[in-house]
Every structure is written in C-alpha cells, then in structure tokens.
Amino acid sequence: MYNMTRYTSFVETQTIFLEEDKQVEYRIERDTLGEMKVPADRLWGAQTQRSKENFPIGSEHMPMEVIRALAILKKALRPATIN
C-alpha cells in the first residue's frame, strides 16, 4: 500500500522584491521533488505550485450564472437526499 501523506518538514517565509514599490512574500514548501516557492497568501502547497508553473491552462473562471444554476439544482435535490 502506498503512503500518500504529504511531507513538509517546515515552512519558512521569504520576501522577494520585484520592483521598487512591489514586494511578494513567499514561503518555501518542500516535497519529494524538492523545494518550491509558493506565494505566502495562497493555500496550496508545492505540488500545486509546480503544476501551475508547468501547465499554464489559462485564467478563465466559471461564469456566475453557472454557479447559481448549480446552487439552485443542489437546493432542489436536497429534499430527495434527506429521505
């Protein structure tokens, strides 16, 4: 059986200066492939950051109309799942 636990020994935060007035804080996440700089304000880890850098898929978001339609559908189906 494979152990799918994510191993992070510790997290340290660094501040990287991009331009004169802009600075971005990064934390260093470690996994089995090594260290990865992850923006400090993001909730994901090293593997997700690595995927974002290696597989840029765009910045499109789901339209709000679709999200609302799914919420209405889930609300309508809730009584059926209670029984």
Image (tube, rainbow, N blue to C red):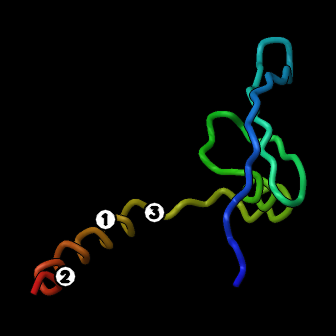
Hey, what amino acid is under mark 1?
Arg
Near-viewer residue (55 or 69): 55
Question: In terms of sequence position, does the residue under pointer 3 or pointer 2 come before the other?
Answer: 3
Q: Residues within 10 Å of mark 2 (few under 14, many from 20)?
A: few
Residue behind mark 3: 63
Residue ID at (40%, 60%)? 64
**Does residue 5 lie above or below 11 as drawn?**
below
Observer-side mark, 2 or 1, equals: 2
Q: Which residue is denoted by mark 2 in the rendering?
A: 77
* Tag 3: amino acid: Pro
Indicate left or right for 69 with 14 as reference.
left
Residue plotted at (17% across, 77% down):
78
Secondary structure beneath label 2: helix
Q: Secondary structure at mark 1?
A: helix
Name the amino acid type tagged 2.
Leu
Q: Which residue is mark 1?
A: 68
The residue most toward the top is 20
Quadrant hosting residue 48: bottom right
